[in-house]
C-alpha cells in the first residue's frame, strides 16, 4: 500500500519558449553570435541551433502514428511547445523516470532485505539514495553559471548519465559478496543522481514555456505525467514476474537500455541549445550574481544534503540521522522564508512543512506485507508478483485515470480548492492503511488482498490530483532568466522534505519498537505499526490550516509572477530589514 504523498511536485526545469508560427525568435535563445555547428563532447557534431529532427506529423502524415498524434492532442501540443522538447521529455520522463525508475525501484527494498537491513535502517538508506533530488538547486546553479563548451544542459546530462549507467550495470553484474551494503547505497545514489539531473535539466525546458503559455501548462503536464505513468505501468507489470523468476538484480541489467536512450535525443540537440560565447556566459553569471541570496540558498541546500548523505552512509544511528534531518529542515525553512520574495517563500514553506511531517513507515510496512508465514504468521504474506506487479499495475492504471480526470475536471480549479479537496480525500482513503495494520479487516472478514487493492485504486487517482497542482505552481514561481535554479530550489526543498519524513519516520518506528528485518517469528515488531501510519496520515492534513496564508488564491492557468519578473528576492524579509 502506498504511503501518503505530499502535494507538491518533485522536479522541474527550464525551457526555451517555442517559436511562433510567424517565425518569431525564441525568448531564451541567442541567435546572433551562435556558430552553425559546435563540436560536442563525444567528438561528434550536433546542430548548434534547434534540432533538425523533422516533426513526426510530417514524416507519418496519414499513417496510424499520425492519426494517434492528432487524436491524442500531441500534435496540438507540439504546435505550442515543439516536437524536440516532447521527444526529450519522452526520453527523460517517460522512459527514464517512468519506466526505468518504476522497474528498478521495487527491487531496492528486496535488495536491502537480502542484506538483512531492518525497517528503520532501510528508510535511512532510502532517504540517502533520494538526496540527489534535493541536490537539484546546486545542479541548476552550476548548469546556469558554468556552461561546458557553451552548453548549459547537455554536457551535465551526459556526465550524470555516465555515472548512472555505470552504477546500474554494477548492481546488475557485481555479486553481493563483492558489493557490500555501503557500496550498494552509493550505486543507488548515483542512479538517482542521473535521474534527478536529467529530470531537472529537461523539465527545466518546460518551466519557461509554461510561463509564456500558462493556458497550455496543464496540457503539457498531462503529457508528461500520463506518459510517466504509462511507462510505470509497463514497468510494474514486468517487474514482479521477472524478480520472482530471475532475482532482484536482473531488472537493473534490463534498465540499462531505457536509461541509455537519453543519449539519442541529447546528441540530436533536442534541447535546442545554442552554444553561448564567453561574453554571453559571463553576462549570465553576472545576472545570477545579482541573485546572490538565491545562490547562497543553493549552497546551503547542497551542504545540508551532503551532510545527510555522509551521516546516512557512515552512521547507523537512526536518532542521529533523524535529528540531523530536523536541524537541516529548520535551517532550510528559515533561510528560504527570509531570503525569497513573500509569495515564493510562503508556497515553499507550505510544501516543505507538509512533506516533512508526513512520516514514512515504508520500511516496516514492506516487511509487514512481504514476510512469509515463518516470519509473520498473522501477516498478509503477499507474493513478490502481487506486491510489485498486481498492485503496481492497478495503481498505475488508476494514476492514468487520475491524470485524465485532473485535466478533464480539475485543471481550472484554484490551487487552494484543489489542494484542500485532494488532501482531505487522500487522508480519508489512507486510513485504510491503519485499518490493515491493526488487522481489523481480518476481524471483519475482508481479505488483505482485496482491502489493499481497493484502497490503492482510489489513492492513486486522488494522489494525482494532489500532485499535479504542486508541479504547476512551482513552474509558475520561476522568475524569468533563472528558471533552472529557482525551480531546482523549490523542488529540491520539497524532495529534501521526503528524506526528512523518511528519517523521522525511522525514528518513530524505533520509538514504537517496530523494527522488523525479515527474521523468524517477528510478529511483535508490527504491534505498533498502525500508530506510525496514523501519524503519517493525520500530520500532513493538519497543515491544510495554513492554506489561506501560504497558497495564492489563483487558478492554475493564471500567472502568479509578472512576465518581466527576474528577481526572486524582491520584497523579501531580508531586504526589508536592510531597508532595500
Image (cartoon, helix red, strand yellow):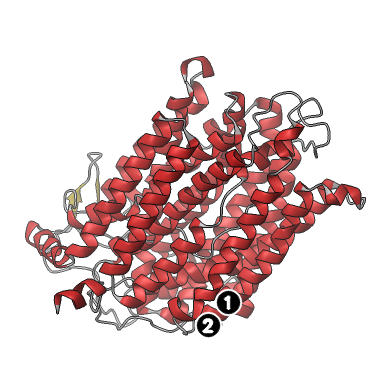
**Circle 1/circle 2 CB separation < 8 Å:** yes
Q: Is residue 26 above or below residue 122?
A: below
Which residue is painted at 78% across and 48% down in the image?
A: 438
Disc 2: CA contacts within 10 A as few (<14), some (14-19) or many (>=20):
some
Could you say whether the residue bearing mark 1 is in a helix, strand or loop?
Answer: helix
Residue 313, label in figure: none
In the depicted view, which residue is nearer to us: 314 or 237? 314
Which residue is painted at 39% across and 67% down in the image?
A: 206
Quadrant housing residue 463: bottom right
In this orientation, does residue 150 appear? yes
Q: Is residue 445 above or below residue 368?
A: below
Residue 414, label in figure: 2
View extreme (left): residue: 279
Query: How far across and down, in percent of the image, does residue 429 sit?
Result: 72, 63
In the depicted view, which residue is nearer to us: 396 or 478? 478
View extreme (front): residue: 511
Which residue is painted at 46% across and 75% down in the image?
A: 217
Q: Is residue 352 above or below residue 117?
A: below
**Left of 309 or right of it: where is 418?**
right
Query: How far across and down, in percent of the image, does residue 386 sit?
Result: 76, 41
In this orientation, does residue 75 appear? no
In the depicted view, which residue is nearer to us: 340 or 484? 340
Which residue is painted at 41% across and 56% down in the image?
A: 88
Residue at the disc numbered 1: 418
Could you say whether the residue bearing mark 2 is in a helix, strand or loop?
Answer: loop
Quadrant housing residue 6: bottom right
Amino acid at each position: 500500500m502506498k504511503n501518503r504523498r505530499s502535494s507538491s511536485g518533485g522536479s522541474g526545469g527550464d525551457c526555451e519558449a517555442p517559436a511562433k508560427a510567424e517565425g518569431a525568435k525564441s525568448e531564451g535563445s541567442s541567435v546572433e553570435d551562435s556558430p552553425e555547428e559546435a563540436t560536442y563532447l563525444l567528438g561528434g557534431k550536433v546542430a548548434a541551433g534547434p534540432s533538425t529532427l523533422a516533426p513526426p506529423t510530417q514524416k507519418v502524415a496519414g499513417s496510424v502514428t499520425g492519426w494517434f498524434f492528432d487524436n491524442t492532442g500531441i500534435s496540438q501540443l507540439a504546435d505550442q511547445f515543439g516536437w524536440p522538447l516532447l521527444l526529450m521529455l519522452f526520453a527523460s520522463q517517460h522512459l527514464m523516470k517512468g519506466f526505468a525508475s518504476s522497474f528498478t525501484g521495487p527491487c531496492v527494498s528486496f535488495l536491502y532485505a537480502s542484506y538483512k537491513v531492518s525497517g528503520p535502517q532501510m528508510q535511512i538508506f532510502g532517504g540517502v539514495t533520494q538526496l540527489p533530488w534535493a541536490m537539484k538547486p546546486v545542479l541548476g546553479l552550476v548548469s546556469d553559471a558554468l556552461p561546458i563548451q557553451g552548453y548549459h544542459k547537455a554536457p551535465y546530462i551526459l556526465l550524470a548519465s555516465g555515472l548512472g549507467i555505470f552504477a546500474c550495470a554494477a548492481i546488475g553484474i557485481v555479486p553481493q559478496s563483492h558489493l557490500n551494503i555501503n557500496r550498494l547505497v552509493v550505486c543507488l545514489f548515483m542512479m538517482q543522481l542521473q535521474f534527478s539531473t536529467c529530470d531537472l535539466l529537461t523539465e527545466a525546458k518546460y518551466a519557461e514555456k509554461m510561463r509564456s503559455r500558462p493556458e497550455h501548462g496543464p496540457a503539457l503536464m498531462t503529457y508528461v505525467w500520463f506518459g510517466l505513468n504509462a511507462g510505470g505501468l509497463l514497468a510494474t507489470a514486468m517487474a514482479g514476474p521477472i524478480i520472482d523468476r530471475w532475482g532482484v538484480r536482473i531488472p537493473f541489467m534490463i534498465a540499462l537500455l531505457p536509461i541509455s536512450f537519453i543519449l539519442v535525443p541529447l546528441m540530436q540537440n533536442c534541447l535546442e541549445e545554442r552554444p553561448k560565447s564567453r561574453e554571453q556566459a559571463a553576462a549570465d553569471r553576472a545576472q545570477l550574481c545579482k541573485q546572490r541570496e538565491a545562490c547562497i540558498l543553493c549552497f546551503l541546500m547542497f551542504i545540508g544534503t551532503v551532510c545527510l548523505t555522509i551521516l546516512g552512509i557512515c552512521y547507523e544511528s537512526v536518532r542521529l540521522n533523524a535529528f540531523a534531518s530536523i536541524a537541516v529542515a529548520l535551517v532550510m525553512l528559515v533561510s528560504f522564508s527570509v531570503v525569497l520574495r513573500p509569495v515564493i517563500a510562503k508556497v515553499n514553506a507550505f510544501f516543505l512543512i507538509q512533506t516533512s511531517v508526513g512520516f514514512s513507515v515504508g520500511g516496516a510496512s514492506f516487511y509487514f506485507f512481504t514476510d512469509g508465514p515463518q516470519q509473520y504468521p498473522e501477516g498478509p504474506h503477499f507474493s513478490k508478483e502481487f506486491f510489485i506487479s498486481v498492485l503496481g499495475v492497478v495503481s498505475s492504471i488508476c494514476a492514468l485515470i487520475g491524470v485524465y480526470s485532473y485535466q478533464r475536471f480539475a485543471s481550472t480549479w484554484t490551487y487552494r480548492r484543489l489542494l484542500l479537496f485532494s488532501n482531505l480525500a487522500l487522508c480519508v482513503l489512507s486510513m485504510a492503511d491503519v485499518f490493515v495494520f491493526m488487522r481489523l479487516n481480518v476481524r471483519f472478514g475482508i481479505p488483505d488482498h482485496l482491502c489493499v487493492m481497493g484502497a490503492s485504486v482510489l489513492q492513486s487517482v486522488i494522489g494525482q490530483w494532489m500532485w499535479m497542482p504542486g508541479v504547476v505552481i512551482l513552474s509558475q514561481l520561476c522568475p524569468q532568466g533563472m528558471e533552472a535554479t529557482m525551480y531546482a530550489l523549490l523542488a529540491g526543498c520539497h524532495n529534501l522534505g521526503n528524506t526528512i519524513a523518511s528519517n523521522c519516520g525511522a525514528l518513530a518506528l524505533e520509538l514504537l519498537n517496530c523494527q522488523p528485518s525479515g527474521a523468524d517469528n517477528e510478529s511483535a515488531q508490527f504491534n505498533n505499526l498502525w500508530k506510525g501510519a496514523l501519524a503519517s496520515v493525520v500530520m500532513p492534513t493538519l497543515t491544510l490550516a495554513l492554506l489561506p496564508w501560504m497558497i495564492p488564491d489563483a487558478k492554475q492557468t493564471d500567472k502568479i509572477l509578472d512576465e518581466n519578473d527576474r528577481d526572486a528576492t524582491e520584497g523579501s524579509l531580508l531586504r526589508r530589514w536592510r531597508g532595500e
